Amino acid sequence: MDDLTAHAALELALRIGESMLSVGAPAADVTATVLRVAAAHGLTSCQVDITFTSITVSYDREDAVPLTAVRIVRTSRTDYTRLQGISDLAREVAAGGLDVEEAHRRLDRVVSAPATYRRAVNALGWAGVAGCFGLVLGGGWLEALLAALTTALIEQVLRALGRHSLPPFFQQVAGAALATGVAVLLLAWDVDVRTSLVVAAGIVVLLAGLSLVSAAQDAISGFPVTAAARAFEVVTLTAGIVVGIAGVLDLAQRAQLPLTVVETSSSPVPFAVALAASAGIAGFWSLACHSRPRSVVLAAGAGALAWTTFWATGDLGAGPALASGVAAVVLGFSGEVLTDRLRVPTQVIAVCGIVPLLPGLAIYHGLFAIVVDADIEGGLSALVGAAAVGLALAAGVTLGEYLGRPISGARDRYDERVRRRAMTTE
């Protein structure tokens, strides 16, 4: 193979991997796809290294120096429609249906395509997530509506701050302060709502619970550097929420308007309400992540399946972590078996489906106990429990995908290579 052809093929594989990472694909899937695309053009001795903000691919040639290329990953937003387009392109390239030049042109069209929905639809998605969370937490329609409106306001403020290139840490501070400030105003105006629940539902959208799951999933899949970077991002973003909550709560206490953590409801949420709200959380989350309408419906079904499995397992006596893990295994298995047939990304079922089970409320409890009640021990206990749930979700999704690959027929030697990397001890 001449150098020009090898460079073009290597650049194509690298661009596909970088594009997948930037729109939310896990590191293991990106590595297997890059190896598959490179091998389709004769580059069978490639090494791939991912470090969260960069991706490196090196082709080891027998009779010449290796060819190595690096690209910086600039994370834009989770976009499942764009991810599906990139995955379809990679599948065609791996099957030998496209040459390098045509594949580059197709990739240019996919990555430069406009957003699937307008900004108003994106804001509606995040507002719907918060409103449904309000119902899951035991609130009524008024609390759910206030949580949705608050989150829509937060989303618009964060979008404006993002346009001015404000770092994410300070965006989290502003979002948390705004959510808590709305609750303080409701208290000051004597509005008859559980203001703490409004705060919790709004904060859940800001919390980096999904990043915690992604970090654990990358660690399990054998990518410790990427996992460590994601975990540090979780810590940084959560610290921004702590600062925003603490600042507003301090002002509220000085004004003798004390907030409280979400009270434990004397009567549990009816199963039908929780089921519908869980389906809404997953569906609205996928909508906010630019999924097509059919994918939104599938995500809503996955959310309902996750909640049903979680409820049934918990009814048998399992704790939150175990019940969450079992539900994640079911979703991971279903996603691996169904997504190729349905032509949607695996994340639509596996990731969106577990969103209703994310430990956002537990994280909020822990932060509130530490910041307001000065209960370090209780707060740390809640945060450790949240971490256990996040790890169970990540491990369950990974295990479910592993169990589903023999049935789906998607497992090949490149997936096996990535899996051996996770199990190596050298």
Image (spheres, grey):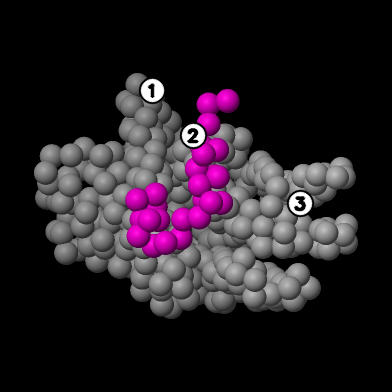
Look at the image and tell me in which quarter the N terminus lies: bottom right
Return the mark for residue 376. 1
Q: Can residue 413 be seen in this view?
A: yes
Main secondary structure along the magenta-highlighted residues = helix
- CA separation, marks 2 and 3? 27 Å
Count every numbered label the image shows and give the total: 3
The residue carrying mark 3 is 71
N-terminal label among 1 and 3: 3
341 versus 275 height, above or below: below
Q: Do the residues labelled 1 and 3 touch (CB within 8 Å)?
A: no
Q: Where is residue 341 in the image (x, y as percent from the top left)?
A: 41, 72
Please tell me in which quadrant of the rendered image residue 225 appears: top right
Q: Which amino acid does label 3 sit on?
A: Arg
Q: Look at the image and tell me in which quarter the C terminus lies.
A: top right
Residue at horizontal 56%, vertical 56%? 24
**Mark in the foreground, 1 or 3:** 3
Q: Is mark 3 on a helix, strand or loop?
A: strand
Q: Give the range drawn in magenta.
A: 401-426
Name the residue that disc number 2 marks. Answer: 423
